[in-house]
Image (cartoon, rainbow, N blue to C red):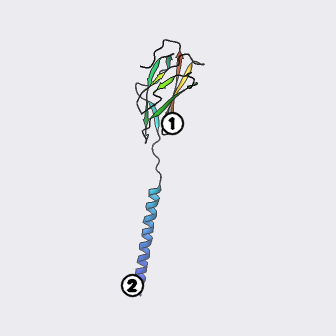
């Protein structure tokens, strides 16, 4: 009788140990690990200029770090990109470190400045902006 009691105790301990291992495994596997957040910085040699003449262009590129999708950025500008008041980008989106051609507007916008913005495709809350002063000058379109 004593051996059957010991056998039941051993079985109960084994079952408890298996449940403990299972609970630990499920808890460990279900944890969500936070990755390093996406960050944006202008690529060396491709920073936006502080000033640009109307109709002139500048190459702008953004380095995207920690992007698990390697989706790059989209470019935009204000005051009103749809009306062409702030200029345009060719292409309007680019992979990390790939330059876009920013073409300044044909006329000086109200206020004399435009703000160009690069926005992460993967995480649209991550943006990088710069202000460019636009002055009258000779036309020099994107190559």
Front of the two marks 1 and 2: 1
Q: Residues within 10 Å of mark 2 (few under 14, many from 20)?
A: few
Q: Where is 90 relative to 19, above or below?
A: above
Q: Where is 118 relative to 11, above or below?
A: above
Q: Quadrant of the N terminus?
A: bottom left
The residue shown at (44%, 37%) is 71
The residue shown at (45%, 45%) is 35
Which residue is more in the foreground, 102 or 45?
102
Label 1, label 2: how many angstroms apart (C-alpha)?
67 Å
Q: Quadrant of the C terminus?
A: top left
11 sits to left or right of 137: left
Q: Residue furthest bottom?
A: 1
Q: Secondary structure at mark 2?
A: helix
| Image quadrant where residue 94 sits | top left
78 sits to left or right of 13: right
Mark 2 sits on what residue?
3
- Whether residues under marks 1 and 2 lie with C-beta atoms below 8 angstroms apart, the answer is no
- Mark sitting on residue 126: 1
Q: Residue 24: horizontal and vertical position, in percent?
A: 44, 62
Q: Residues within 10 Å of mark 1 (few under 14, many from 20)?
A: some
Q: Residue 133: horizontal and vertical position, in percent?
A: 53, 19
């Amino acid at each position: 009788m004593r051996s059957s009691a010991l056998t039941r105790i051993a079985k109960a301990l084994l079952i408890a140990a298996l449940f403990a291992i299972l609970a630990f495994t499920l808890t460990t596997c279900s944890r969500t690990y936070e990755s390093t957040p996406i960050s944006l910085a202008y690529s060396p040699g491709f920073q936006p200029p502080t000033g640009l003449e109307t109709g002139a262009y500048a190459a702008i590129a953004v380095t995207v770090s920690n992007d698990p999708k390697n989706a790059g950025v989209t470019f935009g500008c204000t005051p009103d990109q749809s009306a062409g008041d702030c200029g345009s980008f060719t292409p309007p989106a680019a992979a990390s470190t790939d330059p876009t051609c920013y073409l300044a507007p044909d006329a000086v916008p109200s206020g004399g400045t435009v703000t160009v913005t690069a926005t992460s495709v993967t995480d649209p809350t991550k943006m990088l902006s710069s202000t460019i002063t636009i002055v009258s000058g000779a036309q020099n379109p994107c190559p």
